[in-house]
Every structure is written in C-alpha cells, then in structure tokens.
Image (cartoon, grey):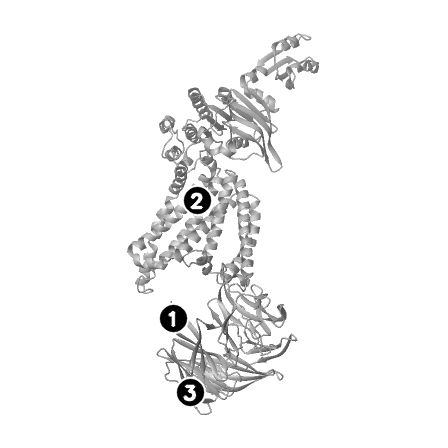
C-alpha cells in the first residue's frame, strides 16, 4: 500500500510538471472539428463522416509527440541535471522511482490523447464509435509504447556523453536490419493474424503492432534496468540500459530467427488440418499440404512416400508440378531478398529416397509451369515468353516468344514432345479473346492456329488431345485447334451450374444442376444431341470425377450441407442401365488443381481402377470392383 | 525494521574502494561513525569525498567493499534506510520547477514521520518564499530548503555533502548556526564533507582526512588538536640537528626561513618538548596550538584552499 502511495506520489508529481501538455491537448482537440468544418465549408467534404479518421490521426500524432517529449525528458533530464539523487535520497526504491516516472509518461500521453478526443467525441459520438475499431486501439497502444520507449532511451543516451552512444549507433542499424528481415519473414510472410488468434487472442489484429509494441516495451524495460543498476549516474544508467536493451533485442532477434526456422521446419507430423491432398500415380507418393500448429498462415506442402514415410518438404507458396505418371515433380524456390530469383528444383519420385535437386535454372518470376506426361520436359511460361526445359539433361531446349501482346497463358498442353499448344486469353473491347498457338520446339517457333472471341467469361475447358474446347459461360463447344465454333451444349437453362468432361468417341459428359436437382447427360457431337439423361437426385453441387469403367462414371454430389459445409458423397453412375449407386458418404476426391496434378484431373476422362477420397482427416481408397473403402492415410500415418 | 546496533556505530565503511575505469579514487577506506557523533570527512578537491557520499547513500555501487548503515548494507537496503536519513547534497538537486510548498507536499507523502509544521516554520524564519520555483531561489534559500527537507523527517542520520559550497560568509554562518542548534536539540548522527574547516571545527567531534585516495587521519578532533602543535625556534645554522631531535614528536612538516624554523608535529607532549628546549640553548623555542585548517594544511602537504 505504501509502495503504491509512493509510486503515485512520484507519478502525480511528474504529471503536474507536464500539465501544460494537457492544456495543449484541449486546443489540439478542436482541430478535427475545425478540419471537417472547413472541409465542408469549402466543399472538400459533404459531411462529417471523416471526423473519426481525422480525430484518430490527430490524436495519434498528439500521442506520438507527447510520448517523445515526455519520454525524452522524464528520466534524461533528471539524470543529466544531477537531480535524480533527489529521488534516491528519499525512501523510494529504484523501481518505484522508475515506475512512477514511466506511469507519468504514459499517463500524460493517454490523458493528453483522451482530451484531444473529447470535443469530437461529445459532438460526434456515433462516428467516433464506428471509427475506433479494436485494431486502431491496438495500433495506438503499440505506437505509444514504441515512441515512449524511444523518447526514454533517446533522452538518456544522447545526454550521457558516454562512449556507449557510439556502440548504440553502430548496433542500431544492425539490429534493425536483422530484426526487420526476420520479422518480415515471420510476421508478414509466414504467420499473420491467424497466429495471434491461434494462441488465444479473440481479436484479429495486426501482428506488426505487436512487434512494434514489444520493441517499445523492451526499450522501456531497459531504462528500468538502467535506473535500477545505475541509479543516479547517467553514464552507469546508459551502460546498464544499453547492455540490457541490446541483449533483449538480440535475444528477440535470435528468437525470431529460431521461430522462423521452426516455422519452415514443419514436418508432416505437425499437420493439424489437411487442406489439399492427392495420391500420385503408382500409389507410392502422395502430396498434401495443410495448417500446422503455431505456424499461422504458413502452409507447408509435402511429397510423402507412403511406403517409407520419408518426405520432401516444399517451401511455402511453392506450387509443385507433378507429371502424369507420378515420376517427377518440380517447384520453384525463392532466392534473394530485394532482387528475387526463383530457382527450379526437381525431384525424381521413382526412388524411395527422393532428394530435391537444385537445377541451374533460375527465373525472375514464378511464371506458370507444365510438365509433360512422363516428366521429362517442362514448360515455363512468363507472359509471352516460354522456355522448354529437358529435365533429364538439365538443358533448355528452346525459348520461344509467343506473338501476343497482352494475353495471359490460360492453358497449355503437350501434344507431343515436340509440339505444345498454348491457349492465351486477353480482354479487348469488352470481349474476351482466346488465341490458340502451336509451338514447334525444334524450330523454336510459335504459330497462331486459331482465335475465338467470347463474352467476358474466360473459364473454359480443353480436351486432353486439344481437339475440343468448351466455353462455360456460353455453353459452347469449339474446335480446340482452330477455335471454330462447333455447337451449343444443350443445357436446360443458362442459369444452371454445369460441369463438363470430355469422353472418348466424340462425346461429352456433363452434369447440370437446376433447382437443387442434378442431372448427368451424355452429349454426342456426332449426333449433335443428348444421348442419355440420368437423374442424380437432390444436389446443391455435383461434378464428374473419373471413369470407373467404359460404362461407369464416378460423380461427386452434394445432397445437403452440414453446419454450412457441403457434405459430399461419391456416386457411381452406370451408363448402361442408368443405375446410380452411392459409394460412400462424406467423401471428396483427393485430387485438385492446386498442384497441377494432371492425373485424373484434366477435362478428359481416364479410366481408373480405384479412386482416392478425403474423408475428414483421412485419405481413403475406393475399390471400384468391391466398393470397399480402405484407409490409406490417417492421423497416425505421419507420426 | 532496522536491527539494533551491537557496536553502536551508525556508519561502517568496510574496505571501500571506488574506481572509475583504471583510476582509483578511494582505496580501501575503513572507518566507523558512532551514534550521536558528528563526523567530518575532509580532503582536497577530487580526492573522492563525493564518491564516498554517493556510496554512503546507496546511489553508487562501490568497486569493492561495502558500507553499512544502521547495520545494513546500504546498496541493498537503500530505500528503507532512507527513512532515517536526511541528505543535503553538494548541489541542490530538487527539481527546479517545483516550489518549496510542492517539495514539502511531495516529501510529506514519502515519510511516515514527516513534520510539516517545523519545516514550514523553518522556511518562514529564513523568509524563503513558498510559491517560487526552487530553481529561482537564491543559493542561500536553496540551502535552507534543502536543510528543511533533510530535517523534515526527523532523521537519525544527517548526511551533508559540502552543504555550504558557493554560499557567502553570512549564509555559511547562518547555516552552521542552524545546524548547531538542530544538533543540540536532536542529538543526530552527522557525516559532513566541507571545505569550510572553521565551520566544521565548530560542529564536528571526529574527523577523517583523505589524502592520495587513502584515509590518513581518523581521529576525534580534540585528540587531533591535542597531538598537533606548531613549534618555532630561531635559525642558528645547525637547524637540521635540532629538527632531528624533534623526531620523537613525529614531525610532519618543516619550514626553514631567514628568521628560524617552523615545524609541525603530530605527536606532541610537553616532556619531549621541554627536552628539546634544553638542547643547546633552544629556550627561545615556542609552541602553539593549531586550528583544524592548519592541521589539514600540514597533513595534505600543500597550502589548503
């Protein structure tokens, strides 16, 4: 109790000495009103909607100014004027002297800021309530801590005339550089607000504010160490302050470095939720990514060997491109800080001990990639420039400039090892153009083969052979090489949701959903008519997955939702007798386009003997002959 | 709770050493100040008196050794010990923008035994304005405010670090008179450093003299003055032999001039002096008592300030 009284005595004494700042706050508080009034008078604003933001900005400037002024004077002045002994000659502990002065600094800043706020708050209560979100309040507190700390430290170190100042000035850019680099990686790139929520904060606020606030706190605490150790001697205070501050900041930087290393060292056992998962051809490897505890939005991706449980870790945001035969995977790894480069990394998945090989190829941007079916060739597309790389020989076979100005590569196909088809899309005069180019790898030439113009809806599918193209918006089928219109797909309504897959024999299978009813239709291009219509029942969503046999298609439908989430089910549709059999509930295909896995994932349907699904956290294998569901991966697989 | 003192010493310097970098300012200093005594710590400028006071007040950590106040290590227990200690610093250290009234209010919240009435009376007696910023007061007024604040908590120990520095003769006299009165009333223990040796002689009962970073004298003033004498005798050309005969009195300073020899001895006794007078017609030899200032000058080896 007596300590609290002493603390308050010191604090109030300091606040009294700075009462002029509080008076100034009241005057400054009129500025937001004036600003908005003048803005309205001169027609710059039509109302007082901006007053919340203006008040916040002025209050923040005021708080930063007060933090620096109070911070710089409250300890530094007393130490340099040899007045600190006045407090140390009294029955006040070092912590109370320091604590009282810090309390006064923060008290002046908070009281001053509140006074600045008052006039606007009284007149425009609602505007200010809406503007002052928790994020802004957290930012405000962080900045107050930072600038108070800066003022306190600056007030001492620039007055002490100690050689430690030289050391401080030398270490500042080093720590800022290292800290900035590490925190940029940790806080911006890898983590983010998700981490803050994950460790228990209910509010989703800016983690950069936390970092700034923490540095401010470190500076404030170091002045405490300085006062406790050095007491009345400014040089000794400076010495203790610098030692503790730099130790603290180096510890923080090292911890940040360790934390960033920990983030990128995530292994499959750290996965808490799989977001994407696929089994590669040959059933030896799977690829998956997901969230891991404590790593925020960092989502590692792993190539996981199902037999040996060994894995290859891919960096965050690196898309893996896997060949159709599942033998080869490639991705790009970021290098450099300011001038970034992306190095091509390849891995041979035929071996159980697949090791990433860093190739000699680097690119100024990630671009778009495609692997040939056998994984021997890769295409890199950077706007209109494409490179064809022989991955077996680490050799660039060709670099070709596609003669297009403003398009972006939407799809590309290996028609043969020496022929590549590129579909470029570009918007021109409120319509969308799709340009079709064939690239001759040997001749290193690209030729425009066809062009089609559509409305502004660029989603389209191309058959595996590149002979057919389906435009979703218009429900139109085109020749995949020339862009020549073939026919309209006879859908019931233009409002219906449609999913299309190309079949053999010049046929197209599509599911259509209208009024929560799904229908599978087989359209013959030769006959230009729907050959077969099979009802799939009630469904909010449906898509064709693969071909179980010549007469059987696997379709996924979503009859209903559970707590807002789609509840998918696997359905086999017999084209011979139109029988629809539900194979399993809560299943969604364990394949997706994120990794550009071409197996079973292009617009053409391939015949498969089994299919993989994600069932909650597991990956299961559906045997299409026996209809058995067998767990391939479960929560214990990675551990 | 401050423990009771078994040896009756309020202050105990134990092998105190203070260094600034490679420079040693105080070297292995030990002395005690008994309860109720007034101890004067004197020395030339820069010998480390203020460092000793800062260490005594727990404001500076000694390089080695320690100081105990009331039986407790002052570096560790400074805050609680300060309840019993009044301090008058070398330079007035109260915040310049605070008035005497604000300073009194501030201190009154910190001491359980604060006596606002006597503090106000003291300041009124010396016509110190209560609502003028401390920084705007005269040196003498600042000294009175400092003294009033130091005595306001009725301390058991008063630490005075050259309190009359920069004061004129009248202010110095007033200050020491006020202090003498307080000491007579309260029976406080006092440690004081000052260059005003006449003032110190009036109030101190013990003295410590620092020379070359070491404590060379630590005595009661009366004993010191009884031991030190100035002896003058005519110059008869064989003064060295006579001087040697004074060695039993422990000669600390000898000055030879045209008219004769002046020696300062630190171990004076009448029998030895009379033997000396009987040597070869030294009947003209005179002996005189010395002031603290004379003794200090003789010990530090050069003319004092």
Q: Which mark is residue B167?
A: none
> Which chain does tag 1 point to?
A
Say whether disc 3 or disc 1 marks the residue closer to the N-terminus: 3
A43 and A613: which one is in front?
Answer: A613
Label 1 secondary element: strand
**CA gap, disc 3 and disc 1:** 29 Å
> Which numbered mark, 2 or 3, is in the foreground of this view?
3
Say whether disc 2 or disc 3 marks the residue closer to the N-terminus: 2
> Which numbered mark, 2 or 1, is in the foreground of this view?
1
Q: Name the residue tied to disc 2.
A: A102
Label 2 secondary element: helix
**Callout 3: few (<14), some (14-19), or many (20+) C-alpha neighbours within 10 Å?**
some
A63 and A504: which one is in front?
Answer: A504
Answer whether residue A17 is visible to the viewer in this image: yes
**CA gap, disc 2 and disc 3:** 80 Å
A372 and A433: which one is in front?
Answer: A372
Q: Name the residue tied to disc 3.
A: A532
| A536 is higher (above) or lower (below) than A289 | below
Residue B140 in picture, x, y percent from top left: 43, 29
**Callout 2: few (<14), some (14-19), or many (20+) C-alpha neighbours within 10 Å?**
many
Q: Name the residue tied to disc 1.
A: A561
Query: Residue A286 is drawn in which quadrant?
Result: bottom right
> Which chain does tag 2 point to?
A
| A258 is higher (above) or lower (below) than B213 | below
Q: Are marks 2 and 1 in contact (CB under 8 Å)?
A: no
| A240 is higher (above) or lower (below) than A263 | above
> Which chain does tag 3 point to?
A
């Amino acid at each position: 109790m007596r300590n609290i009284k002493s603390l308050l005595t010191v604090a109030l004494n300091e606040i009294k000495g700075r009462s002029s700042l509080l008076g100034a706050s009241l005057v400054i508080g009129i500025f937001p009103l004036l600003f908005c009034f003048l803005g309205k008078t001169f027609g710059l604003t039509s109302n007082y909607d901006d007053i919340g933001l203006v008040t916040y900005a002025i209050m923040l400037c005021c708080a930063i100014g007060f933090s620096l002024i109070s911070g710089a004077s409250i300890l530094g002045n007393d130490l340099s004027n040899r007045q600190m002994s006045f407090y140390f000659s009294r029955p006040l502990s070092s912590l109370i002297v320091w604590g009282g002065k810090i309390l006064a600094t923060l008290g002046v800043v908070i009281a001053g800021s509140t006074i600045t706020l008052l006039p606007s708050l009284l007149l425009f209560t609602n505007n200010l309530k809406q503007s002052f979100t928790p994020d802004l309040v957290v930012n405000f507190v962080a900045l107050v801590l930072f600038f108070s700390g800066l003022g306190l430290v600056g007030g001492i170190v620039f007055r002490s005339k100690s050689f430690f100042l030289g050391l401080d000035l030398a270490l500042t850019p080093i720590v800022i550089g290292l800290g900035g680099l590490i925190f940029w990686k940790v806080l911006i790139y890898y983590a983010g607000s998700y981490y803050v929520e994950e460790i228990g904060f209910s509010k989703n606020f800016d983690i950069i504010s936390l970092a700034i606030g923490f540095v401010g706190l470190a500076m404030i605490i170091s002045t405490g160490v300085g006062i406790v150790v050095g007491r009345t001697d400014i040089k000794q205070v400076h010495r203790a302050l610098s030692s503790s501050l730099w130790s603290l900041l180096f510890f923080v930087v090292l911890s940040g470095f360790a934390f960033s290393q920990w983030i990128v060292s995530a292994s499959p056992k750290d996965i808490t939720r799989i977001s994407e998962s696929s089994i590669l051809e040959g059933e030896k490897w799977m690829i998956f990514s997901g969230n891991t505890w404590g790593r925020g939005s960092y989502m590692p991706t792993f190539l996981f060997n199902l037999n040996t449980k060994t894995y290859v870790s891919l960096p965050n945001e690196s898309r893996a491109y896997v060949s159709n035969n599942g033998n080869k995977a490639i991705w790009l790894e970021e290098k450099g800080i300011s001038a970034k480069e992306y190095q091509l990394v390849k891995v041979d998945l035929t071996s159980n001990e697949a090791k990433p090989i860093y190739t000699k190829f680097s690119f100024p941007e990630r671009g778009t990639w495609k692997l040939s079916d056998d994984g021997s060739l890769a295409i890199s597309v950077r706007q209109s420039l494409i490179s064809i790389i022989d991955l077996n020989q680490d050799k660039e076979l060709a670099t070709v400039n596609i003669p297009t100005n403003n398009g972006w590569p939407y799809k590309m196909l290996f028609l043969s090892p020496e022929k590549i088809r590129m579909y470029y899309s570009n918007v021109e005069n409120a319509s969308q153009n799709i340009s079709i180019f064939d690239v001759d790898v040997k001749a290193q030439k690209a030729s425009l083969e066809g062009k089609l113009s559509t409305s502004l809806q660029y989603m389209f599918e191309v058959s595996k052979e590149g002979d057919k193209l389906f435009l979703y918006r218009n429900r139109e089928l085109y020749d995949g090489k020339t862009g020549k219109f073939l026919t309209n797909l006879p859908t019931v309504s233009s409002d219906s949701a449609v999913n299309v897959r190309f079949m053999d024999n010049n046929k197209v299978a599509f599911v259509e959903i209208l009024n929560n009813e799904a229908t599978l239709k087989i359209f013959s291009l030769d006959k230009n008519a729907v050959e077969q219509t099979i009802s799939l029942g009630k469904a909010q969503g449906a898509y064709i997955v693969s071909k179980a046999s010549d007469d059987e298609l696997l379709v996924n439908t979503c009859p209903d939702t559970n707590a807002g989430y789609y509840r998918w089910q696997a359905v086999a549709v017999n084209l011979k007798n139109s029988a629809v059999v539900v194979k399993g509930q809560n299943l969604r295909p364990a394949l997706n386009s994120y990794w550009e896995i071409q197996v079973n994932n292009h617009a053409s349907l391939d015949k498969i003997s089994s299919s993989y699904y994600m069932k909650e956290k597991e990956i299961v294998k559906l045997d299409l002959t026996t209809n058995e569901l067998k767990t391939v991966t479960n929560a214990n697989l990675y551990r | 709770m401050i423990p009771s003192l078994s040896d009756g010493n309020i202050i105990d310097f134990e092998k105190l050493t203070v260094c600034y970098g490679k420079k040693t300012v105080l070297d292995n200093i030990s002395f005690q100040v008994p309860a109720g005594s007034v101890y004067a710590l004197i020395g030339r400028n820069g010998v480390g008196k203020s460092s000793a006071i800062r260490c005594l007040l727990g404001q500076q950590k000694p390089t080695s050794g320690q100081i105990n106040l009331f039986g407790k290590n002052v570096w560790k227990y400074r805050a609680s010990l300060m309840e019993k200690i009044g301090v008058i610093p070398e330079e007035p250290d109260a915040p310049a923008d605070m008035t005497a009234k604000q300073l009194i209010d501030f201190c009154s919240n910190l001491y359980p035994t604060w006596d606002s009435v006597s503090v106000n009376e003291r300041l009124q007696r010396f016509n110190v304005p209560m609502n003028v910023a401390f920084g705007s007061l005269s040196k003498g007024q600042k000294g009175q405010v400092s003294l009033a604040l130091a005595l306001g908590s009725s301390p058991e120990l008063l630490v005075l670090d050259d309190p009359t520095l920069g004061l004129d003769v009248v202010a110095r006299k007033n200050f020491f008179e006020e202090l003498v009165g307080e000491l007579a009333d309260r029976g406080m223990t006092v440690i004081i450093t000052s260059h005003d040796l006449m003032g110190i002689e009036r109030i101190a009962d013990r003295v410590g003299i620092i020379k070359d970073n070491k404590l060379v004298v630590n005595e009661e003033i009366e004993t010191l003055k009884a031991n030190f004498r100035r002896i003058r005798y005519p110059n008869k050309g064989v003064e060295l032999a006579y001087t040697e005969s004074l060695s039993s009195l422990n000669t600390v300073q000898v000055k030879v001039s045209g008219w004769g020899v002046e020696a300062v001895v630190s171990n004076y006794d009448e029998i030895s002096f009379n033997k000396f007078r009987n040597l070869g017609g030294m009947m003209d030899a005179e002996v005189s008592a010395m002031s603290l200032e004379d003794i200090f000058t003789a010990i530090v080896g050069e003319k004092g300030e």
